[in-house]
Amino acid sequence: MLPTPEHLDLKKDQGLTITWTDGTVSFYAVDYLRKMSPSADQRELREEMARNPLTVLPGTGSDGPLQAIGAELVGKYAVRIRFSDGHDTGIYSWNYLREIDPGPIM
């Protein structure tokens, strides 16, 4: 059985820290979460960037640094994060968050 979150801590200007039931602690920076959004449009952008490294990235549409302005649980399997650039369609399942874990916290 895959581990599930025991505790979530979202710092809007920094990122999301998850303590998992297996004792692992993961930190996902706001920029990383936005880049790795599982939404269809972001997946397509990542695929295009893999094919063409000169792909023009969309602007953030905000005046300041990107922030996570909120989050809500989706059932017992995921979290949806709203970003200051207006993006809010990515639903991050626990399995997906484990797959994209950037590495252990030192």
Image (cartoon, helix red, strand yellow):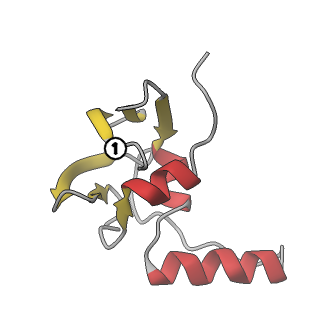
Kindly identify which residue carries mark 1: 4
41 left or right of 86 in image: right
From this view, report whether residue 55 is shown above or below residue 23.
Answer: below
- The foreground one among 83 and 74 is 74
- Classed neighbour count for the residue bearing mark 1: other residues with Cα under 10 Å, few (<14), some (14–19), many (≥20): some
Identified by mark 1, the residue type is Thr
Q: How many marks?
A: 1
Q: Is residue 2 above or below residue 29?
A: below
Residue 104 vertical position relative to residue 66 in the rendered view, above or below: above
- Residue found at the very far front of the displayed protein: 1
Q: Position of residue 85 (x, y in %)?
A: 37, 62
The relative height of residue 53 versus residue 66 in the rendered view (above or below) is below
Res 53 → quadrant: bottom right
Q: Is residue 76 left or right of residue 105?
A: left
Residue at the (43%, 30%) spot, across then down: 22
Residue located 74% across and 76% down the image: 49
Quadrant of the image for the C terminus? top right
Name the residue nearer the viewer: 9 or 53. Answer: 9
User: Residue 24, image x and y in percent?
Assistant: 48, 28
Secondary structure type for disc 1: loop
Residue 28 picture location, percent across and down? 49, 40
Left or right, 26 with reference to 80: right
Instruction: Please name the residue shown 25% across and 48% down the image.
Output: 69
Is 54 in front, or is 5? 5
Question: Which residue is located at x 37 percent, y 45 percent?
Answer: 67
Q: x and y percent of residue 45 in the render?
A: 62, 79
Based on the displayed image, in which of its 4 quarters is residue 74 positioned? bottom left
